[in-house]
Amino acid sequence: MKNIIVGTAGHIDHGKTTLVKALTGIDTDRLKEEKERGISIELGFADLKTTQGMRIAFVDVPGHERFVRNMLAGVSGIDLVLFVVAADEAIKPQTREHFDICRLLGLRRGVIALTKADLVDEEWLALVRMELEDFVKGSFLEGAAIVPVSAVTGMGLDQIQLEILKAAEGLEQRDQRRMSRLPIDRAFVMKGHGTVVTGTLREGKLTLESEVELYPSGKVARVRGIQVHGEKVKEALAGQRTAVNLAGVDVTDVERGFVAAPPGKLRPVRIFDAEIQLLQGARAIRDRAKVHFHAGTVEVAAELRVLAEKRQIEPGATAWVRLVLDAETLVLPDDRFILRSFSPMVTIAGGTVMELHFGAARLRRKGAVDRLEKWKAMALPARIQFLVEQRPLGIEFAELRQSLGCLEEEMPKGLEKIGSWFAAGTNLKQIAAELVARLRVHHKEHPLEPGLSREALRAGLLAGAPVPLMVALLRHAPSVKAEGDLLRLESHKVKLELKEDEASQDMEKMFREAGLAVPAVDEVLRASGLELGKAKSVLTLLLRSGVLVRVGAEMVFHSEALLALRKIVSARRGERFGVAEFKDWTGISRKYAIPLLEYLDREKVSRRDGDARVIL
């Protein structure tokens, strides 16, 4: 069944609530004060199940100028507007403001109801119709059905319902594949159930027993129960008026303006760039003007910063701005919003969220407008590609999701995927070229070294990126070869000159002849006859080849000596011994015994057992 949200709009006392009641049988004025004063103060809700496979949910909004903030909390989630004008009064101030709000929120469909049609004659009705046609000319309501109705006589009620259905037929069902977002417009306690919140599910699905986070508070609750149009269901779908019974939070933890969405997936913001349109009848806006920001069900004060060189926006103009909110709220790119002035408190502009900025974002006006013009023209895949390409080392998917509200299946093809990390192949090719250049310099400066360690290169080139990114990087550098923990250019071969080769043989001989009572490394390096740096490189080659083995920080042994030691020890398998016995077996001092015992422990030849050891 197709779910459509219809919102009323219009001046106070033009019959919005009465018309909804006549269509649905439900009185949306539920508060005692509303009954006593005869006006709507808060949002009201009703539903109408039709025979055309469509369910209409009505959001009835207050028409008084003092309650426009309440009206905005309801109208932001609607699919089409039931625009109400009383035939005996025609267009009034809130008719105009509600109309402006609907236009600025990007509504595309609606039906116009000429209420109280039984109170005027045909000639007057024709004049009001002409005035309305002229009023909506050039807007989304141009050509919309204008239906005279009377809730008293029943005149036009069937026709208005038919026109609503016709207008709804062309609407697309909201996307149920995206992450669920439920802007909360009401929170209350239901006896025996606890905290209940209501709202229009903007997108996605909400399922029983799932968890939701209440953004921006960060509190997490469990969905204990769901109702749609008063019926218990296992899941709510995008486009449905939804009541959710939450477990794990108190009603004092929730307020209008919060958004229920999957935990940890999104991130509230205070700063974002946007495109706004200033109403023709509004005053010019200067840089750093204070405004009321309304999006979804939230209202928060904000400071507006003009991004263009001219620091003022003229009436009727479209402009790029940065909004700095007084408090964090959850919005995503392409969300629509309304701006109202502080004094007088009237609607002055509407806009579209474009790019989010987390943390303290520095304002750089130069190039900002060009960047945002390009951003506006991009579809979601292009925006993802753009953000990934802006990060040379790539970006964690969680950050992309926070910035765009995207799903992993929406990631464009062609990006390098490393776990939950995404990088652009073009960027990796550039880094691979830098890797090759660094190795070339290193080989030139250190010809006796077989290569550079992966960790050294990763820390220099891929700082902050996940370790597996190096593997992806090497796919773009076929001339680089990996050997253990070393990387080298394929063309690089270590070739010892005569003097270096002789020094290598001398070093090996010194350690081989020393047996287990080896000389100090510094002593061997000094005796090599080479410059210290080259001597260290030759020693490193012997260590990497396995001829020599480093046992401690300052102690190196010949591999033949260690093999002989293993034979001595293995012949006593199962025997328990101490340091003294080990010294007797090997004929070495404590200086060498302790490092060698620790080496044998590491090699699983022996095992510590209290103050002694056991040969394995």
Image: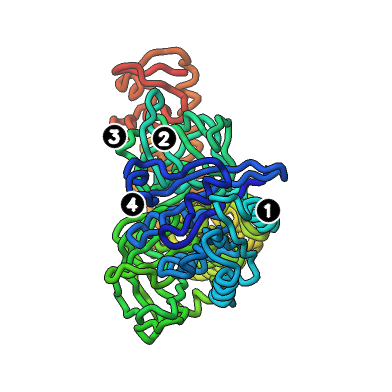
Classify mark 4: residues with Cα within 10 Å, few (<14), some (14-19) or many (20+).
few
Q: Which residue is mark 1?
A: 162
Task: Determine the secondary structure under disc 1.
Answer: helix
> Which kind of residue does numbered mark 2 sit on?
Val
Q: Earlier in the sequence, mark 1 or mark 2?
A: 1
User: Which of the two marks, 3 or 2, is nearer to us in this view?
Assistant: 2
Residue at numbered disc 3? 591
In the figure, is residue 331 to the left or right of 37?
A: right
Q: Residues under labels 4 and 3: Cα distance? A: 16 Å
Provide the residue designation for mark 2.
196
Residue reaching furthest to the bottom: 310
The residue nearer to you, when weighing 241 against 444, is 241
Secondary element under disc 4, as helix, strand or loop, is: helix
**What is the crowding at mark 2: few (fewer than 14 residues within 10 Å), some, or many (at least 20)?**
many
Please provide percent x and percent y for residue 464: 43, 56
Residue on which the image places disc 4? 523
